[in-house]
Amino acid sequence: MSARTLLGTLALVVLGLLVWELRWVLLVLFGAVVLAVALDVPISLVRRLLPFNRPSALLLVLSVLVVLGGWLGSLLLPEVVEQARQFSLLLPILGHRLTDLLGSLPGLPKIDSRLLNEQPWERLQPLGSQLLGVAGGAANSTVQLLLMVLLAILLALDPRSHQRLVIAATPRFYRPRMQTLLTECREALGGWLAGMTLSAVVVFLSTWAGLALLKVPLALLSALVCGVLTFVPTIGPTAATLLPLAVALLVSPAKVLQVLVLRLVLQNGEAFLLTPMLLSRTVNLLPTVALMSQLCLGALLGLPGILLALPLVVVLQVIGQEVLVRDVMDRWEH
């Protein structure tokens, strides 16, 4: 092995260790980029319609978001909080209902009684320390989220300067290609965010209307959870379905079946019709790639990794197509 090869290998190892140590900083930075692109979509629209410069357009977009968020909060938040309180009060009833349902199945009463005789309260003694850990993690996540929002605003305020910084760090012969690559990554990420936002809104409204027609309690809370978790494809909609099913179980088993059919129709319509139609011109992710990316980043980084897995895969797919396929594989000669 030559000295140059050895030095390059050591440099890659050191770079990999540095990236791993700074993974949370890089995660916050990438999250800020995603939020900046989300802000850039309405900013670009405002600048096309009105003679505003970028700072003025950014201020207008932020003001509209604050006003709209405050209006929606005053309209929906009291009802969501009240339904969340009602759900917390219904949890013991739901536990008894599940116990009775499991006990009615053959072979499960003995398992149920054995679990009850194991005194689970003794195993919940370290709950206080676990709650302290959760509180500390929540505080840390809040700080990271605030830093992410601040960085996103700064990036959206002057994206050109940051693009020039990235291009300047690229070898001269590849700078025009890097400019094109950054533009395509921004368009793909912006299209994915716009499509997923529209999809989430449609899922929220249709789930809310469907649960209200079925007269399922806590319809608004269930629909809100289903809409938010639409941003986590494959895993999110399946997990979101558990809440309306649990609430429907408090009414009757027949209501559970009705809610399950409703969620299957809406979930499959969103996954196979709405989302592909909205993302057909931007990016198309294979379900296997989306699921594996969520599992891998979830195992490495927890919940933030799951939330940012899909935007990261969108960017990596563009980079892979443009760099690996076109610049390397297509030019490979025997």
Image (spheres, rainbow, N blue to C red):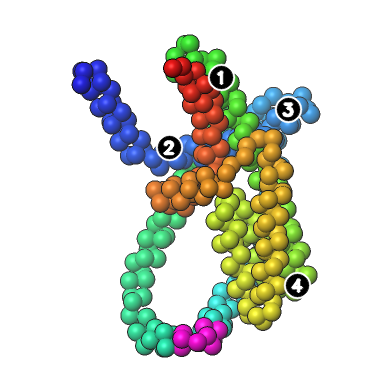
Image quadrant where one finds the C terminus: top left
Task: Specify whether residue 200 is painted magenta.
Answer: no
Q: According to the image, label 4 marks what residue?
A: 214
Q: According to the image, label 3 marks what residue?
A: 47
Instruction: Give the mark nearest the N terminus, 1 or 2.
Output: 2
Secondary structure category for the residue under label 2: helix
Query: Which numbered mark, 1 or 2, is in the foreground of this view?
Result: 1
What label does residue 26 carry, if any? Answer: 2
C-alpha separation, residue under disc 3 versus residue under disc 2: 30 Å
Question: Looking at this view, is 318 or 34 the one in front?
Answer: 318
Secondary structure category for the residue under label 1: helix
x%, y% of residue 222?
A: 65, 65
Q: According to the image, label 1 marks what residue?
A: 179
Question: Looking at this view, is 129 or 74 the one in front?
Answer: 129
C-alpha separation, residue under disc 4 versus residue under disc 1: 52 Å
Q: Amino acid at mark 1?
A: Gln
x%, y% of residue 292?
A: 48, 48
Q: Is residue 136 above or below residue 316?
A: below
Query: Which numbered mark, 3 or 1, is in the foreground of this view?
Result: 1
Secondary structure category for the residue under label 4: loop
Whether residue 152 is visible? no
Q: Is residue 228 above or below residue 316?
A: below
Instruction: Give the mark nearest the N terminus, 4 or 1.
Output: 1
Span of residues in magenta? 100-109
In contact (CB < 8 Å): disc 4 and disc 2: no
Image quadrant where one finds the N terminus: top left
Relative placement, left or right, of 39 versus 3 is right
Q: Identify the residue at image location x=71%, y=61%.
A: 265
Could you say which quadrant of the image residue 86 lies in? bottom right
